[in-house]
Image (cartoon, rainbow, N blue to C red):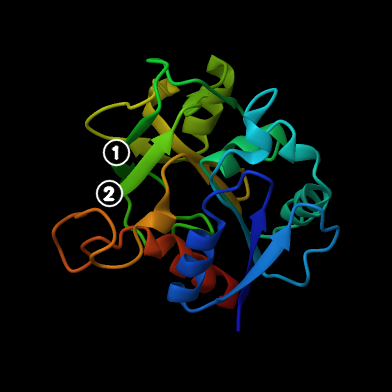
Amino acid sequence: MTRVGVVTFPGTLDDRDASRAVRLAGAEAVSLWHGDADLHGVDAVVLPGGFSYGDYLRAGAISRFAPVMGEIISAANKGLPVLGICNGFQVLTEAHLLPGSMIKNDHLHFVCREQVLSVENVDTAWTRDYTAGEHITIPLKNQDGQYVADEHTLDELEGEGRVVFRYQGWNPNGSRRGIAGISNAAGNVVGLMPHPEHAVEEGFGPDGAKGPRTGVDGLRFFTSVLKTLVG
């Protein structure tokens, strides 16, 4: 069975939700502690949301130096699929696995809502089960969710097709060009601010597109990586 590691830092909130999403997708969820210097043979890694180390200094800045991150950075650079959700996305930018940075929302308030996203790239390890141009509904909850980067980096992301998700209807945090999620050049590392692990089971997530996948728009992140890993 495919084994997906879910990392817990001090202050992580959504590790159990992420593990549950992994199990619902049909994989084994493996708990990884921030102090681990071993990935225990996992096939992919999820960095879940929360407020690791209390967001001291800035979100994700301390987590980036946790022992487990040294292993994740090395493995990601060799092709290991890695998904960073919310605080996990912040950690990935601090670790320079993804470009740019996350700063406070432009309205300076915490936001919590059901957010519509457009799927821009279905060629990553985490998006193969989506359709390009599809609109999905995923819960969003953040305080430091504004994605920023210089114009050259933004143009590069756009030109290389590395914008994976974009906010639709309303830009909830002022992110440049409405960017909600991006990937690295190889497509194995993806980070996004919304929380797909909170939309994996009917009756316990947003209404979605009112279709056969109602409330489970996030589950396909986790089924996508399984398809990637089994070829």
Quarter of the figure with the N terminus: bottom right
The numbered mark at residue 113 is 1
- Decide: few, some or many residues near mark 1? Use Cα within 10 Å; few <14, some 14-19, many ≥20: some
Quarter of the figure with the C terminus: bottom right
Q: Which residue is mark 2?
A: 137
Three-letter amino acid code at the position of disc 1:
Arg
Mark found first going from the N terminus, 1 or 2: 1
Does the CB distance between marks 1 and 2 fall below 8 Å? no
Residue 171 pos. (x, y %): 31, 26
Q: Relative to the observer, which residue lies in front, 152 or 141?
A: 141
Residue 194 pos. (x, y %): 41, 43
Camera-side mark, 1 or 2? 1
Residue 59 pos. (x, y %): 62, 30
Q: From the viewer's perspective, is residue 89 above or below residue 6?
A: above
Residue placed at 39% from the left, 21% from the top?
109
- Decide: few, some or many residues near mark 2? Use Cα within 10 Å; few <14, some 14-19, many ≥20: many
Residue 115 pos. (x, y %): 29, 40
Q: Relative to the observer, which residue lies in front, 130 or 106?
A: 106
Q: Relative to the observer, which residue lies in front, 138 or 153?
A: 138
Q: Is residue 61 left or right of residue 13?
A: right
Q: From the viewer's perspective, is residue 203 above or below residue 156?
A: below
Q: Is residue 22 left or right of residue 137?
A: right
Residue 19, can we see it?
A: yes
Q: Label 2's element?
A: strand
